């Protein structure tokens, strides 16, 4: 048998009684494999007619990395792609970008395409690594990294994200320090782990400031502009509207801007707004948006470096890495207007 589509390093690993990374380390000439194990793996590789990649492919200078999004219609995705592409290009590796839109048919088509091309690794973004996909990637011997997983990933799959809880906390505490007591929140999708962490940070910020958590000031969004507009309009139409709104994404914050303008309200004079992401347009919006920066390009770059290391058979010690968030102060937040009035008097 000499067809590598049937004989994978997963096949060799099972026959040898070792892990897939161990077989990968043998293939890549790493010295941290015992002589006995190396001999057993080499023998099985020969018996199964496994075709080795050439040396340029083995050292990661050729090949492809698959970057898989649920959707691509967001500046957030563009920033993360930029980080992946930067690292991949520096390593001489191409990037294949796919969007599966959470559709089983699209996922099956992507898997079929993956079997044809020789990808060094796969990076999933904001996705749940299903058992079917995980099993197939293991069978093919293709390593995987997940950025901002939907839920708790398998213990053996490295995940990369940001300190979302800390970001939610810092945004809420900032608004409380400005004197706001009615702080609204527009959350992202409930099933997404980073969204839940930002919501928990918001709640912790209210509690730290001694403020009551008012469920009437909390709305469910989906990270996109339209939901920010719709949910922001609902909050601002209340008889006792919030004086500040924190949104779980910059896109939703821009939606709140629009909702405020349509009600004749000014940001930040009438309502303060904080976003989350620090997308490039945040600094050019009117007014420039105060937001929590998550290092999207750096997250993408780290994901690319990690998956390429795994492809070389290296070990990754930290299964979960969170890069630091930072509150970026611009012009969309201000001291609560009644406090300003007392100060001016």
Image (tube, rainbow, N blue to C red):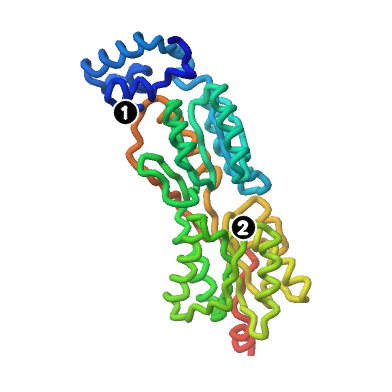
**How many numbered badges does the structure rendering display?**
2
Residue that appears at 67% across and 81% down: 238
Please determine whether, in this image, residue 137 is positioned above or below residue 197.
above
Instruction: Identify the residue position indicated by label 2 in the image.
Output: 223
Query: How would you rate the neighbour count of disc 1 (Cα within 10 Å): few for under 14, some for 14-19, many for 20 or more?
Result: few
Describe residue 341's horizontal placement relative to residue 129 as left or right: right
Please determine whether, in this image, residue 128 is positioned above or below residue 240.
above
Query: How would you rate the neighbour count of disc 2 (Cα within 10 Å): few for under 14, some for 14-19, many for 20 or more?
Result: many
Instruction: Identify the residue position indicated by label 1 in the image.
Output: 19
Using the image as rendered, state which of residue 78 and residue 39 is in the foreground.
39
Q: Quadrant of residue 22?
A: top left
Q: Earlier in the sequence, mark 1 or mark 2?
A: 1
Describe residue 158's horizontal placement relative to residue 330 as left or right: left
Describe residue 7's horizontal placement relative to residue 110 as left or right: left
Residue 231 in the image, given as x and y percentages of width and height: 66, 69
Please determine whether, in this image, residue 71 is positioned above or below residue 35.
below
């Amino acid at each position: 048998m000499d067809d590598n589509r049937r004989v994978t390093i997963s096949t060799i690993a099972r026959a040898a009684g070792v892990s897939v990374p161990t077989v990968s380390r043998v293939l890549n000439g790493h010295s941290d494999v015992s002589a006995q194990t190396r001999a057993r793996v080499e023998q099985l590789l020969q018996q199964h007619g496994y075709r080795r990649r050439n040396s340029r492919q083995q050292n990661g200078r050729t090949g492809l990395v698959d970057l898989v999004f649920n959707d691509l219609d967001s500046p957030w995705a563009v920033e993360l792609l930029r980080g992946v592409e930067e690292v991949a290009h520096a390593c001489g590796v191409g990037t294949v970008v796919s969007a599966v839109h959470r559709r089983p048919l699209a996922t099956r088509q992507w898997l079929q395409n993956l079997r044809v091309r020789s990808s060094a690794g796969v990076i999933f973004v904001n996705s749940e690594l299903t058992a079917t996909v995980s099993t197939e990637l293991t069978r093919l011997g293709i390593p995987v990294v997940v950025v901002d997983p939907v839920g708790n990933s398998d213990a053996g799959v490295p995940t990369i994200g940001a300190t979302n809880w800390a970001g939610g906390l810092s945004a809420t505490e900032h608004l409380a320090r400005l004197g706001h007591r009615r702080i609204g929140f527009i959350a992202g999708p409930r099933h997404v782990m980073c969204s839940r962490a930002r919501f928990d940070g918001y709640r912790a910020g209210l509690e730290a400031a001694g403020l009551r958590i008012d469920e009437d000031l909390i709305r469910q969004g989906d990270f996109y502009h339209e939901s920010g507009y719709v949910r922001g309009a609902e909050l601002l139409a209340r008889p006792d509207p919030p004086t500040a709104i924190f949104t779980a994404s910059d896109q939703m914050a821009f939606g709140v801007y629009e909702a405020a303008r349509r009600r004749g309200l000014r940001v930040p004079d009438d309502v303060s707004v904080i976003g989350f992401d620090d997308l490039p347009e945040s600094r050019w919006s009117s007014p420039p948006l105060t937001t929590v920066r998550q290092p999207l390009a750096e997250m993408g770059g780290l994901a690319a470096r990690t998956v390429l290391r795994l492809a070389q058979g290296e070990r990754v010690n930290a299964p979960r890495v969170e890069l630091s968030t930072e509150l970026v102060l611009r012009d969309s937040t201000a001291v609560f207007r009644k406090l300003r009035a007392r100060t001016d008097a």
